[in-house]
Amino acid sequence: MLNTYKTILSHKTQLNSNTYLYHFDLIESKEIIFKPGQYVMLKVPSINGLVSRLYSIASSNAIKNSFELIVEIVPGGLASNYLFSLKENTEVIFQGPAGMFGLKKNERTKVFMVTGTGIAPIISIIKSEFRIKNLELRINLFWGMKNYKDVYLFNELKKLATIVISAKAGIQFKICLSREQTLDMIPELEKKYFELGYVDSCLDKLLTTDYSLLTSSDFYLCGGRQIVESLRQFLVAKNVPKENIIFEKF
């Protein structure tokens, strides 16, 4: 049975031209227990009563009295209009948590292939699960964005990439820019975190030096339905077993 949470929007932060980070503090219940990768259901007022919209939790599950969402505002969308106009200190109702997307607890390398706000459940997984030292997690993140100016969470990802738990564990990430022709606008010391092209082409480039990733990894896909299906087919064509492909479609 899903729990109902009365929350208050404590603050929202604009991340790029159409994406916002929303921070909700719990009023009732007093804590939220969730599996990293799960979502909550926002209850949106409409002329037909409350309707539900699903949003992946983007914060660590170590935090019990609040949670964060990363939301792309879609012009004309019911929930987008509601969230865009939502003022701080407004009460908001959610239900949840729900969903089966999450990290397999094994020693295999984790390869995350995500686009846009599909980063939300992934950043929750990384923040939450990377704390489990005995898992020796090796993480490769490929995050697809259209343009450099749209990139957010970059400094946070850089900090996570500096964490060294052991010789085997660590985080590497590439932000894959699909609509840029050059990386010249990026500071020289930061270019190593970026590639031109789509997520699948970025992974292909890594495979030229570490082809064993295809057999030693679990692949986690998150983003729009068509993109996730395209990435799934890409991996299947490379003979990645279906049980090693975990996905969440928006």
Image: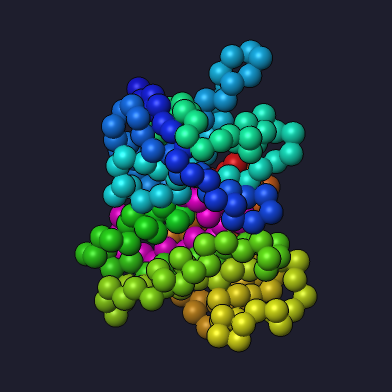
What's the image's color scheme?
Answer: rainbow
**Furthest residue to the left?**
134
Does residue 211 appear to the left or right of 168 in the view shown? right
Q: 92 above or below 164? A: above
The front one of 10 and 238 is: 10
- Residue at 50%, 66% (x, y): give it: 141
Q: 213 above or below 7? A: below
**Furthest residue to the top?**
48
- Residue at 33%, 27% (x, y): give it: 28
Does residue 30 appear to the left or right of 14 in the view shown? left
Q: Position of residue 140 (x, y in %)?
A: 46, 68
Q: Position of residue 153 (x, y in %)?
A: 52, 62
Please tell me whether residue 116 belongs to the stretch shown in magenta.
yes
Q: Position of residue 187 (x, y in %)?
A: 62, 82
Please tell me whether residue 233 belongs to the stretch shown in magenta.
no
Image quarter (top left, top right, bottom left or bottom right) of the C terminus:
top right
Q: 164 above or below 83? A: below
- Residue at 40%, 43% (x, y): give it: 67
Q: Which residues are magenta?
A: 102-121
- Residue at 63%, 68% (x, y): give it: 176
Q: Is residue 93 visible?
A: yes
Does residue 188 appear to the left or right of 100 in the view shown? right
Q: Position of residue 158 (x, y in %)?
A: 46, 72
Q: 17 above or below 196? A: above
Image quarter (top left, top right, bottom left or bottom right) of the N terminus:
top left
The front one of 117 and 202 is: 117
